[in-house]
Amino acid sequence: MREHDHIKVIARMCRICMRELEHNRKYPHAKLIRLGIGDTTHPIPPIITSAMAQHVYGLSTVQGYRGYGAEQGNMELRKAIAETFYNDLGVKGSEIFVSDGAQCDISRLQAYIDTGVIIGQAGKFMEETGKYQNIVYMNCSPENNFFPDLSNTPRTDIIFFCSPNNPTGNAASKQQLEQLVEIARANGSIIIYDSAYAAYITDDSPKSIFEIPGARQVAIEISSFSKFAGFTGVRLGWTVVPEELLYSNQYPVIKDFNRVVCTCFNGASSIAQAGGLACLSPEGYLALNGVIDTYRENAKIIFDTFASLGFKVYGGKNAPYIWVQFPGLRSWDVFAEILEKTHVITVPGRGFGPGGEEFIRISAFGDKNGVLEASRRLRNLFK
Amino acid sequence: MREHDHIKVIARMCRICMRELEHNRKYPHAKLIRLGIGDTTHPIPPIITSAMAQHVYGLSTVQGYRGYGAEQGNMELRKAIAETFYNDLGVKGSEIFVSDGAQCDISRLQAYIDTGVIIGQAGKFMEETGKYQNIVYMNCSPENNFFPDLSNTPRTDIIFFCSPNNPTGNAASKQQLEQLVEIARANGSIIIYDSAYAAYITDDSPKSIFEIPGARQVAIEISSFSKFAGFTGVRLGWTVVPEELLYSNQYPVIKDFNRVVCTCFNGASSIAQAGGLACLSPEGYLALNGVIDTYRENAKIIFDTFASLGFKVYGGKNAPYIWVQFPGLRSWDVFAEILEKTHVITVPGRGFGPGGEEFIRISAFGDKNGVLEASRRLRNLFK
């Protein structure tokens, strides 16, 4: 493991990494298979890296040199994003804000729990429940078809919703999202919709919240090239803020967001943006779908492995994550047993929140041979 | 002007852009020279872009593919930054946090006024003074040798200090920074020291706050590859948080900062980081100093032009900015006269705050022929 990968894992999921290190010491000759971390592993198609390299070489020429770009991103890229992902949904290039990845814009939107805690708006942490006081947790589990009972959910200013979901791998249906938009409209809430895994949808689940009529008045959508194009290290994403989204005083949210972006951000790297444009060319888009197909095959192998062993298995069809239920067990115990007996790294569901206690998450972001070998070992363990 | 440059200027300095557009309509055939905006213009040396291109091509190979890196940056780069810029100052690689540019970390540190205003900590804006209530403005002008009278400055939690300074172009002396560190130590304040222009220092002014004994207990330093390496579009910077810097409850600030970085940020683009490493190689560093020398020559031409015309001129020796005083005049009027009569774009000092009213800022980030032509026109206007 390279030093920087190593440090990254420590920072990101200390406890899993510690277990992995212990395991390595105990079984120095075992072939470990990592199906835990949610990071892409396949090389980026050459048509996309060629475009980035061409941009990079241009930076050494008078004609090709570029300094600061627009904080909102290059307009050509903004238009290409609107056309590729929001064709016929009425989204304009000027409503797309290019970011250095979804994580950073989420932080700017102060929506995710961790970020909310840092700026002090989450309220007190309650030891007994493992929850923060000012946050309403929407339970999404097999019992409710991974969609909350909105009639019993208290009103909030912001509704954060991620579909296809990490970790459950579930994509919300059109009907479910219609309910979500309806409740946001009734309550004057803003939906922050994370569609970073939309490229993995294979059925007719909506790929964007803006497929739902009325969503333009209540939703912001955050998305990313990370999992769509293997850009987790290149860093590129976008946020859609529709012009029709207004605060209760009728002031457009897009104007506010534009000010935040221009003040707190100096734009995504021009090199990453050149790569993003190549991803959205017909050839680039086709090549990326080939990569996504290989991850989909992995997901099917993992899903079928657990399903054939009699487990209740979720996700995998519309997302690169498979969510396996172990009723009555604790996720860290399941994680430990799988690691000990098969040398396969997974992620305990508890790490994603109290609702994940009986689950483990398995990622399809591996190479196919590793996934096949993991499948063989898991079948042996649970047969 | 390309579309994305155009939009960027509108977002960044609307009013100057509007004046430029008006001017273009009035004098469609005039050759405009832009010495306003603080953006680099020279191509990046090929040794650096080659390294980035090599990294980019590697992303299309199994061996060279990289996903998420450490949020804090690649350790090889962190060490190279520590060795290049903080040799003998005791800064370790682990105290360097690689960012996507100084602006973004400043926003994370909530230090700059605009950002402070957005998160609601600046207090009320007072129309009569043009200042925010909860911010203490440290007046830096020729009268006090561009350094505040610290004995008369109220205590604040955070002291933001930028040297070499934008817009004045002045670099603080060792003695002045010793006073700053002393007052921060006495008051329990944290200094956030912006050294983004340190590469332009030619005299013995400190290039880092950590040249001052005791600074490790009271200071964070923010810096950038933007103006050092022409990376304004590539996006790469760093922040130094010394281990000895503690909150009043003795908790290390570096631990807190690490948590903020890991939660709100997913690391700078791996491509930009590969470029940063090449900048710090002996050949890359030498080539960059050649580029900086050409900006220095521009600065000298501009400085000498105004000095020979009898103006009081500041900056230019340790920074790419020249700060020219027009006693008794309003900076927007001076800006307008220069534009009307010479077709040269400058920046009115008032845009930087109330203390800039009698000044204009002229940037050395142009090409030499443009600077020479601007000098000729300005000499004609003010002779």
Image: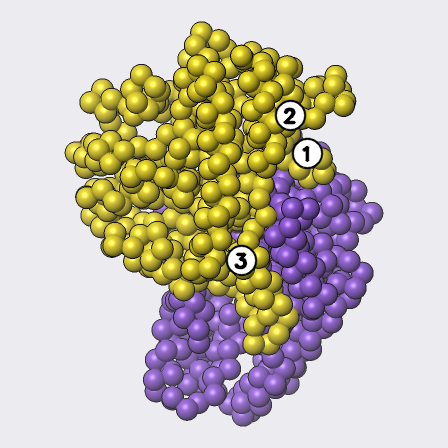
Chain colours: A yellow, B purple
Do the residues marked 1 and 2 share a common chain? Answer: yes
> Are the residues flagged by discs 1 and 2 in contact, CB closer than 8 Å?
yes
Asked which secondary structure carries label 3, the reply is: helix
Residue at point 47%, 43% (across, down): A292
Image quadrant in which you'd find residue A72: bottom left
* Amino acid carrying mark 1 in the image: His
Q: Residue A6 carries which label?
A: 1
Q: Which residue is under mark 3?
A: A48
Q: In this view, does A71 lie above or below A220?
A: below
State the separation of the CA atoms marked 1 and 2.
Answer: 9 Å
Q: Assign the C terminus of chain B to one quadrant of the image.
A: bottom right
Taking depth in this image into account, of A205 and A96 the one nearest to the observer is A205
Instruction: Say which chain tag 1 marks.
Output: A
Mark 2 surroundings within 10 Å by alpha-carbon count, few (fewer than 14), some (14 through 19), many (20 or more): some
> Are the residues flagged by discs 1 and 3 in contact, CB closer than 8 Å?
no
- Report the side of B75 relative to A127 (left or right): right
Asked which secondary structure carries label 1, the reply is: helix
* Amino acid carrying mark 2 in the image: Cys
Q: Which residue is under mark 2?
A: A17
Q: Can residue B150 be seen in this view?
A: no
Which residue is farthest right?
A: B88
Q: Is residue B297 visible?
A: yes
Q: Which mark is residue B125?
A: none
